[in-house]
Amino acid sequence: DVKVTQSSRYLVKRTGEKVFLECVQDMDHENMFWYRQDPGLGLRLIYFSYDVKMKEKGDIPEGYSVSREKKERFSLILESASTNQTSMYLCASTSDRYQPQHFGDGTRLSIL
Amino acid sequence: AQSVSQHNHHVILSEAASLELGCNYSYGGTVNLFWYVQYPGQHLQLLLKYFSGDPLVKGIKGFEAEFIKSKFSFNLRKPSVQWSDTAEYFCAVTPLLRNNRLAFGKGNQVVVIP
């Protein structure tokens, strides 16, 4: 069974801090994704990666960056956290477009 | 802008009632279609998917969805819901020309009253 593990379930940070969210998948998937989920807005794609060191902007990349140094790990970075980045962050992975994405449990991030 | 639309964000119904959730997308050409479900406190999981073939697809827990290409729709149905179907349901689309990117609808929050 595919396992996508996000490092923290809940996280509280302060405005201006640099925040790292980590995601690890155990199925050797090429493609990994970061979304944020907000009530009434559904899931919005922040960034995705289709290979090690390769990344592509999603629909809302502003204020975020990503890192993919190893195939199994995809990190989301908030360079200088702001209160409007308080949200649920979801990581997902898939092998290709014909397979469903597998999601982690999410990290609920609060920026104070 | 190209998008995925889900209507009636909040749906409340009684056990044994029938459920239908609408999903329309605006992408042209070949698409792959998915419905995901998120039960309270759990991660998103796949309910069903459509890539090609029979436009009526069956998923887990008695759900089914029908792809109508002419209407750009992929509506989800269940004839008789249970309290355990209380969840948020998301329609998602992968257009052929967008690699593996999924575009999600805003979701339907479904509450089933015992």
Image (cartoon, rainbow, N blue to C red):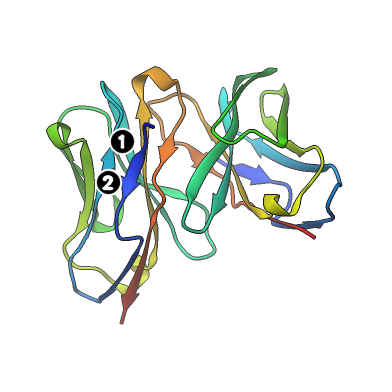
Please, is residue B92 above or below residue A106 in the view? above
Q: Which chain letter goes with mark 2?
A: B
Neighbour tally class for label 2: few under 14, some 14-19, many 20 plus, Cα within 10 Å = many
When asked about the image quadrant of residue A20, the answer is top right
Residue sitting nearer the eye, A84 or B44: A84
Give the SS element for disc 2: strand
Residue A50 x, y percent position in the rendering = 57, 20
Which mark is first along the chain, 1 or 2? 2
Please, is residue A60 above or below residue A55 in the view? below
Residue B34 x, y percent position in the rendering = 33, 40
Q: Which amino acid is tagged 2?
A: Cys
Q: Which amino acid is tagged 1?
A: Leu
Residue B17 x, y percent position in the rendering = 18, 72
Give the SS element for disc 1: strand
Between circles 2 and 1, the one closer to the viewer is 2
When asked about the image quadrant of residue A100, the answer is top left
Please, is residue B73 above or below residue B44 in the view? above
Q: Which chain letter goes with mark 1?
A: B
Please, is residue B54 above or below residue B98 in the view? below
Question: Is B41 on the left-hand or right-hand side of B102?
Answer: right
Q: Image point 24% across, 51% down: which residue?
A: B22
Residue sitting nearer the eye, A59 or B90: A59
Q: Which residue is mark 2?
A: B23
Q: Which residue is mark 1?
A: B33
Considering every residue shown, the one lying at the far front of the view is B1
The Cα–Cα distance between marks 2 and 1, rounded to whole angstroms, is 10 Å
Residue A14 x, y percent position in the rendering = 84, 55
Question: Is B12 on the left-hand or right-hand side of A109?
Answer: left
Have a look at marks 2 and 1 and say if they share a chain. yes
Q: Which mark is residue B42?
A: none
Q: Are marks 2 and 1 in contact (CB under 8 Å)?
A: yes
Q: Image point 69% across, 56% down: which residue?
A: A9
